[in-house]
Image (cartoon, coloured by chain):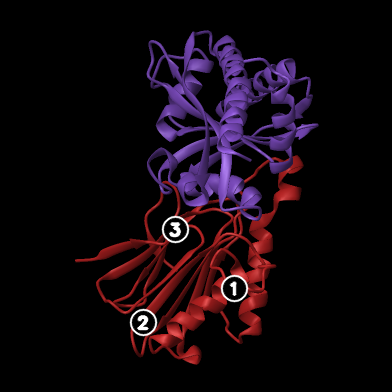
Chain colours: A red, B purple
Amino acid sequence: MANSIAIGLAELKVSRNPDDVLVAFGLGSCIGVGMYDPAVRVGGLLHAVLPFNSDTKELSPKYVDTGIALLLDELTKVGAVKNRLITKVAGGANMLNVSSLSSSFDIGNRNIEAMHATLAKLGIKPKSEEVGGKIGRTVRLYIATGKMTLRMMGEQEREF
Amino acid sequence: MSDAKQKQYVDKLQQIISHGFENAAKGFAGMVGQMLQVVDSKVCAVSLQEIANTLGGPEMDAVGIYLRVEGEISGQIMLILPYQKALELADLVMDLPFGTTKTLGSLERSALAEIGNLTGTFFLNAVSELTGIASRPTPPAVMVDMVGAIMDVIIATMGRVEQNVLMFQSTFAFANRETNADFWIIPDPETLEKLKLAGEGLNG
């Protein structure tokens, strides 16, 4: 039986239980980063809200930069190896369709930039990206297989 | 702030926003041509996580009508309702029989945007009447998506400031049609300070 575990805002979870499905529901401007090591079948999912953490003391999953670092850390602790990780990312939409509002609130794009910069710094290249646009996304990571899926409003779940 | 002062402050805010919501409801009612009730308007502090869990969870299909408030006071206004209810509201505004609107095209979206515009303006006018502080709404944005994605707009704006967000919440319900909408006002932190000072000048 699949065991669905919701990853809320500013949260990350790592699992090695093949029954687990990690889910980040309704990502808008937020970014979901999934990492999976197929050799040891361990995976983790991050739901980050904002691009960069200015507080160097607290490594919070709320931010893309420190969130990715924490995710990698947690995965390594349970046996994953960085260069085996399959990384997929989704989110970073610009939800506001009014030009007078969107220019000053383009958090989505800034989150995408932060994600690219952070992954590049760590030497990780995402295998798949579904970012930007104006649409919300639900992301799932199946621990048993490492499959990652997307679902948009009114659409079927599909692998990416 | 002492507990007694804190309570007094919240009471004053409550007084200001209740007046605002009632006036907003009048604007809303004027547009849809029906009386409606303001249910349960309150001042509350919610966590970022709770915001995304409104209306039955972050993956629910919903419609959000969003405005920024600019001027002496600033903040965000969000009118959010389940997708199905938004279709019914579009019927109501365009004076069509229930069930006519099946999708939200540009006409329906602009009708919903107009509701946001009117409701927001009426709310701000009422606040201004009571406090003497002027402000104006930006043009509204209409979002049709999952609740979580819609609420990210508020969360991204407030999230850098704090984990808990103080906001004013109300529900509008129509007497003879069960369409309801959640109406949220999220003042920017510096605005709360101004409202507090203005509130101290009020009686009661």
Mark in the foreground, 1 or 2:
1
Numbered disc 2: what chain? A
Residue at mark 3:
A8
Identify which residue, A58 or A123, lies in the foreground: A58
Residue where numbered disc 1 is placed: A66
- In this view, B199 is above or below B141: above
At a point 37% along the width and 54% down the height, the residue shown is: A156
Picture coordinates of residue A159 (x, y %)? 40, 67
Residue A117: quadrant of the picture: bottom right
Q: Is residue A19 at all visible to an observer of this figure? A: yes
Q: CA distance from mark 1 to mark 2?
A: 20 Å
Q: Quadrant of the N terminus of chain B?
A: top right
Image point (64%, 44%), residue name: A96
Distance in Å between CA atoms under marks 1 and 3: 16 Å
Tell me the amino acid under the disc marked 2.
Val
Amino acid type of the residue tagged 1 in the rendering: Thr
- Image mark 1: chain: A
Which-is-in-front pick, marks 2 and 3? 3
Can you say which quadrant of the picture contains the C terminus of chain B? top right
Give SS at disc 2: strand
> Helix or strand or loop: what does disc 3 sit on?
loop
Of callouts 2 and 3, the N-terminal one: 3
Q: Which mark is residue A42?
A: 2
Q: Residues within 10 Å of mark 1 (few under 14, many from 20)?
A: many
Task: Answer with left or right where residue B98 lies relative to residue B158.
Answer: left
